[in-house]
Image: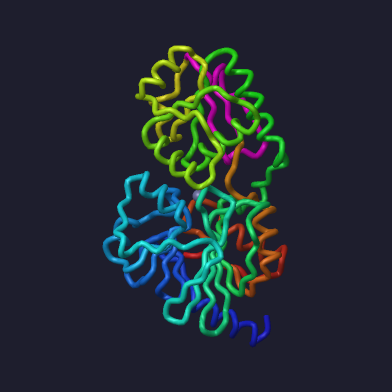
Amino acid sequence: MSLTLDATINRLLRKAKITENSAVVFKNFIACDGHDDNAILRIVTHAHHDHIYGLRESIKKTPFIGMTEATYDILTALGYEIPENKTLILNYDKEIKIKDAKISLHKAKHIIGAAQVLVIDEEDDRLVYTGDFKLPSTPILGADLLVIEATYGNPNHVRPFKYEVEDLFVDLVKTRLAKGPVHIFGYHGKIQEAMEILRSRGIDAPFVVPRRVYKVTKAAMKHGLRVKEVFYYKSFEAEEIVKTGWYVFFAHLNTARIYSKQSVTNIVLSGWEFSEPLRQINEKTYLVALSDHADFEQLLEYVEKSKPKIVITDASREGSAYILAREIKKKLSIPAIALP
Ligand SMILES: [Zn+2]
């Protein structure tokens, strides 16, 4: 590595860090997806639990909380109350300026409202944080310094079946619905994506959901989710629907113990499956490999097309950040480190 390259990289590295609190911090005052005491702006890239660490503290201490309107609505559905005078709704591709830095959010294909962060500073350096994303349908941002998620940062994390999962999922639900109710478990966001896949492929059985999933789904519908016939499970209609036995019940993965039943078909949506798109766990339980994250090859594709001078892989969240950094250096010859 030449001396000038080193100097450039060092200069760039002073502009970004990832803290023990899982905050991706740019220029010491923009904290993404974690709380930082010195931040002026806390950005929430999306409403998944591992990206809203310390949000209640940020709501108390940080002057501004920035996010898309869809993320704001989902956070509200999840019980977060962000004061109006701190709320900074940022539309995709619209730039704001704080302390000589131009800050903008850009679409990320992940859950509704998800965003990437671009900061262009006074030296015209482009600092990018991808947040969570998958390809295609996520615009690849050109970066000088790139902070990238590393969920599937291991070369073994490649799905050979990228495009057949949805078909298999729809067929499974169709077949099993003929035999009785189907219960589907996943994270917020993925549940709504699954709903949309089923509806768009002609599954018209009513959807029945617990309260929080109902609220998040309503927020997502406000922002373009194309799903109809969703009922809160304690409503009169839902009680009548359940009696017929022809319905799909959706619940958060963390509540699977409460809502999975021997008497129904249970389907778990999980990205952590690389061998087969669909796997039967026991007589009535199936695992479908529906993922919201780029696999290993897509992470490398993003880095290659973004053309950064230095990459930071996010080791503060679940994933394989150290392996990904090593692979980026080896396969793309681009300097990369895992932080924190
Ligand atoms: Zn996420």
Rendered residue at 48%/40% (across/down): 187
| Rendered position, 303 above or below 197 | below
Residue projecting furthest to the left: 60
Task: Classify 164 as above or below 151.
Answer: above
State left or right for residue 112 relative to residue 279. Answer: left
Q: Residue furthest bottom?
A: 4
**Residue 203: quadrant of the picture:** top right
In this orientation, which residue lies closer to the viewer: 18 or 227?
A: 227
Q: Where is residue 234 in the image (x, y as percent from the top left)?
A: 35, 24
Q: Residue at x 71, y 69 (%)?
A: 333
Residue 149 relative to residue 155: left or right = left
Residue 221 visible, this angle: yes
130 within the magenta span: no
**Residue 313 visible:** no
The quarter of the picture where the N terminus appears is bottom right
Q: In this view, does 41 lie to the left or right of 139?
A: left
267 falls in the magenta region: yes
Where are the magenta residues, as a range? 263-288
**Percent coordinates x, y for residue 278 in the rendering:** 64, 30
Residue 166 image position (x, y, % from top left): 66, 34
Looking at the picture, the colour scheme in use is rainbow
The residue at 66%/67% (across/down) is: 306
Residue 336 sits in quarter: bottom right
Q: Is residue 304 above or below residue 132?
A: below
x and y, in percent, of residue 120 in the image: 54, 76
Left of 150 or right of it: where is 99? Answer: left
Which residue is at 43% across, 77% downward? 98
Q: Which of 193 and 231 is in front in this view?
A: 231
